[in-house]
Amino acid sequence: VDGPFVKIVEVSPRDGLQNEKAAVSVETKVELIRRLQDAGVCAIEAGSFVSPKWVPQMADTARVLTSMPLKSGISYPVLVPNARGLDDLLSLLDSHPNQPLTDEIAIFTAATESFTRKNTNVSITESLDRLSAVTQKAKAKGLKVRGYISVVAGCPYEGAVDAKVVGDISNKLFQMGCYEVSLGDTVGVGNPSSMLSVLNECARFNPPDFFAAHCHDTFGTGLANVLAMVGAGVRVVDTAVGGLGGCPYSPGATGNIDTESVVYALHSEGFNTGIDLVKAAEAGEWIAQAVGKGTNSSAGRALLAR
Ligand code: HMG
Ligand code: MG
């Protein structure tokens, strides 16, 4: 397919696994990353430098980074919530001067006070203040910074979310130095109309191709939301093979929209992703089995049944 390029950001090693109760080994995480590389994914969210008391599953991200095979042309963003997380990452990078483990972090805030508090223990304003300092320091050290806004289309604690608020927060993230903002329908309650009104409010400040669609598939609207966003000019989509995932601070939320269905739909709509669909499906099947589940991807099941 050689139509317009849509970049897939594979979040399965981070968003996909962070909610797993049983520990997933470093070896399994590294093998997942290797399989994603082999499938042609050019951005792989490798883990997070958050508090292990809050998200135990990500406690071994430093070992994942130093154990994974690095491939040039692929970015490996990691989530950083605060100054401590950035400092931990920077000292890891300093101790591996000849290995470019990552050149990108992702910072995250949310569109409601309750979710920001549950996820990061601060108000939205406090979160933006500390993220601004993190971004400044990260950029001074040569790292790119991606921003996330959670619960853009609905919050498990506050219900409806004002799209204007999302737009305003996106503007603040760009002003502090993010190169891209990913719009998270964390609980998967959005529909094409609500996601498009969020994008519309964001477009008061920046064009659609500055944004990524990050849709969870709790109510089965994930793919429709992604296609609506791409139709409106978004060119980056966050997905997880096998539809893996959930968020520890959003009760009931299921996985990210699966890579397989997004890539299948984008290719058939004439977009290019650079991803080998069968290899993505095999990776999805493999990781689902490795964590003791069936794949959540109907496209994946169909492809592998052929
Ligand atoms: P806190 O409890 O307010 O932090 O948590 P604190 O500064 O008071 O520190 C508490 C303890 O944690 C201390 O240890 C610190 O040293 C330690 P103690 O003295 O008790 O032994 N600590 C850390 N350890 C390792 N790495 C760190 C770190 N910071 C402090 N970076 C904090 C505040 C932000 C740390 C916490 O709330 C946290 O880690 N939150 C992250 C939660 C998370 O990872 N959520 C999931 C990712 S976001 C998501 O999934 C949404 C997304 O996918 C988009 C979407 O779908 O919407 C991105
Ligand atoms: Mg998420």
Image: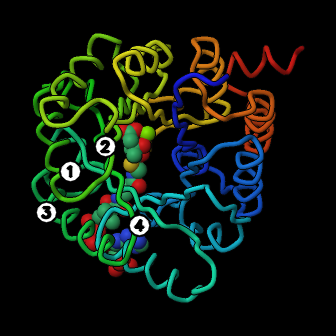
Please tell me which of labels 1 and 2 falls first in the chain.
1
Tag shown at residue 181: 2
Q: Who's the residue at 69% across and 65% down the image?
A: 70
Seen from the viewer's position, the closer of residues 304 and 113 is 304
Q: Nearer the viewer, mark 4 or mark 1?
A: 1
Please tell me which of labels 1 and 3 falls first in the chain.
3
Q: Please, which colouring scheme is shown?
A: rainbow
Dot 1 alpha-carbon crowd within 10 angstroms: few under 14, some 14 to 19, many 20 or more? many
Query: Label 3: which residue?
Result: 129
> Disc 2 marks which amino acid?
Val
Q: Is residue 49 above or below residue 111?
A: below
Q: Secondary structure beneath disc 2?
A: strand
The CA distance from mark 1 to mark 3 is 10 Å
Whether disc 4's CB lies below 8 Å from ligand 1 is answered yes
Query: Label 1: which residue?
Result: 173
Q: Residue furthest front?
A: 2
Dot 3 alpha-carbon crowd within 10 angstroms: few under 14, some 14 to 19, many 20 or more? few
Which percent across, then down, holds residue 129? 13, 63
Q: Nearer the viewer, mark 3 or mark 4?
A: 3
Q: Who's the residue at 44% across and 62% down the image?
A: 104
> Disc 3 marks which amino acid?
Asp
**Left or right: 241, with 106 as reference point:** right
Which percent across, then down, holds residue 145? 35, 59
